[in-house]
Amino acid sequence: MDGIDKLLKPQSITVIGASNNPERAGNVVIRNLLSGCFHGPIMPVTPKYDAVAGVLAYPTIDSLPRVPDLAIVCTNAHRNVEVIRQLGEKGVKVAIVLAAGMNTLYNSDGTTKEDQIFAIAKQYNMRLVGPNSIGLILPWLNLNASFSPIAANRGNIAFISQSAAVCTTILDWAKNKNIGFSTFLSLGDACDINFAELLDRLCRDSKTEAILLYIDSVKDARRFMSAARAAARNRRILVVKSGRTRAGSAAATIHTGGSAGLDAVYDAAIRRSGMLRVNNTHELFAAVETLAHSVPLRGERLAILTNGGGPAIMAVDALSDRGGKLAQLSDNTIAKLDAVLPFCWSHANPIDIIGDADITRYEQAVNILLDSDDFDALLIMHSPSAIAPGNATAKRLVDVLNNHPRSRKFNILTNWAGENEAIRSRNTFTEAGYPAYRTPESAISAFMHLVEYRRNQKQLMETPVSYGEIQANPRHVHDVVNHLLAQGICHLETHEVRPVLESYGFKTLPTWIAEDPAEAAHIAEQIGYPVAIKLRSPDIRHKSEVHGVLLHLRNATEVANGAQAILDRVSLDYPQARIDGLLVQRMAKRAGAQELRVSVHNDAVFGPVILLGEDAAEWDIHKDAAVAIPPLNMALARYMVINAIKTGKIKQRSLPDRIDIPALCKLLVKISQLIIDCPEIKEFDIHPLLASGNEMTVIDASMTIAIFKGNKAERLAIRPYPKEYEEHVTLKDGSMILLRPILPEDEPKHAQFISQVSVDDLYKRFFSDVGELNHEALANLTQIDYDREMAFVATREVMNVYGELEESIIGVTRALSDPDNIDAEFAILVRSDLKGVGLGRILMNKIIRYCRETGLQRITGMTMPANRGMIMLAQKVGFDIDIQMEDGVVEMQLPLESSHQQP
């Protein structure tokens, strides 16, 4: 990450295209650098001037006296190709390109100027930010290398944006609010350095506590998801994603040149990564305010203290609309408030201390609330009052909050309504470190950002119920699909999809093929009434165009006449269409059942995604479907179904057999596995899926297939469970074990395994007394990203207390790689009563083979001098050992590209 390091910690800077013309970007950048008091050398490059803003200038890049860490390119787009080439020859490792429009300037070979500068930079191992960037501000380094008219204060929020206009808007607003930033970077068109690399770096930055992203589009979904999932475990990340509508999405594509994926898919990706999305600028400002001042939320209960009932009711309405929780006051708290408030106060939450409340009444009420444990966050509201002047009340409450020993346990939010004096009051709270909002709705919106973020994180760490082994026959599916492709058939109807579905255990309706109306009537007589008949034609994708589906036919005459009517309509409207007969199905029992629709859509950015909604004639995937990104387990599938119900995509109807959510989740997990196993499936649509209690029946389905070449896992935004690494191994004692990648469902087994490791062995593994690992710690160990971390568990079958065989974990090895896949840190832990059977060596060999296969350059590890077994094992397989007795550590390193002993 050399280029990223020099971008975020530059020691020297050159400005290409520096100018004394105040209307030029090269002049604004130089003046910003000088006004920021950057401590390193600033080297303007321009052939026009001997000096720029009083700083000695250099006529060419080649004439620079040293190689700068960072170059700011302020020249015209047409000149930038040669500028980047010269910077590369000079040895510069990172450049920020300000010019816009480089993705619209084409070369004779059809490539753009943006493509060309990226190719040149890659040739010289140089990294680029932009084009179309306004630059970089690093307040903690006194660096303002931007052409923004507003500087940034020091703070703990990193802001990364593709939009220059959003950058300057946020800066202007934050300046007024006295909110600061740790990093402020405009990515522009992001032709090279992207969100993923910056998330990897910023989540380890000590000055950064929260990260805010403004995204138009994402180019490498797999890398973005991996980085976001890792960063969201360490930092709060909020995302503003433009292009929520089709028109907005098209505009965002033009703006940055990225692919236009479905907005609902972006929404699902943001949730799946553990980030939180805010929808507009109003929410964006509220989010920044919240991130700048809030402490981690300890719960969801909100208490509201107000001197006006109306605004408090508006706050409660907003809270209820967003699914928030109003705190319940205890009898003890109500009794204490009774002693200081008028008899007519609300006696409930919201705590209305009455419009004639003076400052003392506010102070007493706040102290009583802070002494209680009835709430997790407190919203203090104030409407203009002659008895409790706004700013005087604000100052007194700031003193109360600062002096109360428990105030920092809670999230404190304030809403001082009005504009004249209220502005001064809000500034008083902001300067004291308490977020202040103009309206009740914006205060509630800010609070709910914290709540939704907390819920999202908690949901992602939910331990999934084990589905068990999916009964699937992927080989048969491949044979069926390849046979159809060999015949030139790419679009499959229900009868052709049925063998695929049945290979994965889906329940389908039996289907017969009739050549003509007479045969259709004969089949109907055999299978029983009522029946449905459907047109078979490869040239008519939508049967509704010719009324090609007839339902509830009750006798042979209706079947024969209906079939003939379908054929007549095709002959009239589509005379050239090929007709392959008719499908005949027995009607499913729909009484008391609900008709759903499940589809697989191939998104332009995130690849295959699963859509869920109700079956309807006009189904708009932009509005009518809940979205999930595979792979799914039972917890993630349940999250999808609950989200679909909450957002009205699926309506819970009053039916005799309501939808069985676990059964629907199992079906979604099977669809996810089908898509993972069979990359030839491009699109897949079940319409309808008949849900009756726990019975899920596919009534009608269609599928689009195509020849696939390449790594089937690479097309997915999240790497699925790598089943190919499963293997059986025999221990020295002759017992057979299974080595396999760890699963989220392994959490209970992992907890049991940890309980069978001695305190001494755990201390050597974790360098501390870990005690019993809680759910969050176990989730971090079992819910891993297979793209940058691997953990193999050794398991064997044991008899449980019920006399049944169950899988038990007896050892774990894991490797966590850096984002660039160069270095990995490993660890091994074996059950303490199973030493001496060769399990440690087997686990070590397994993780070394894996790291070699994935292209890592070295493995490192750390242990204690007392852990002689680990040290001896590492030496046997070729590790270099460095014992540091003073520090009490042993460092182990294995260069994988060398000719060390093969495990």
Image: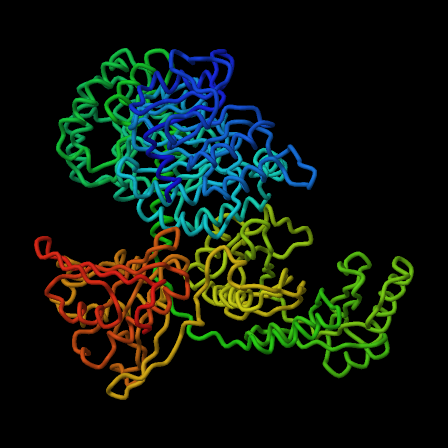
Q: Is residue 657 visible?
A: no
Q: Nearer the viewer, residue 749 or 899?
A: 899
Vertical side of 113 occupied by 180: above or below: above
Looking at the rendering, in which quadrant would you find the C terminus? bottom left
Picture coordinates of residue 796, whole percent (x, y) = 30, 80
Q: Nearer the viewer, residue 876 or 779?
A: 876
Number of marks in picture: 0
Q: Residue at x 84, y 70 (%)?
A: 563
Vertical side of 108 occupied by 78: above or below: above
**Quarter of the image where one finds residue 300:** top left
**Quarter of the image where one finds residue 829:** bottom left
Left/right of residue 86 with respect to residue 755 in the rendered view? right
Picture coordinates of residue 542, whole percent (x, y) = 75, 58
Looking at the rendering, in which quadrant would you find the N terminus? top left
Left/right of residue 129 with respect to residue 234 in the rendered view? right
Left/right of residue 376 with respect to residue 195 in the rendered view? left
Q: Nearer the viewer, residue 677 or 60?
A: 60
Looking at the image, the residue that sits furthest to the bottom is: 734
Left/right of residue 519 with respect to residue 662 in the rendered view? right
Picture coordinates of residue 717, whole percent (x, y) = 50, 55
Q: Residue at x 40, y 25 (%)?
A: 145
Picture coordinates of residue 590, whole percent (x, y) = 63, 67
Q: Is residue 744 visible?
A: yes
Q: Nearer the viewer, residue 368 or 452?
A: 452
Q: What scheme was used to colour the molecule?
A: rainbow
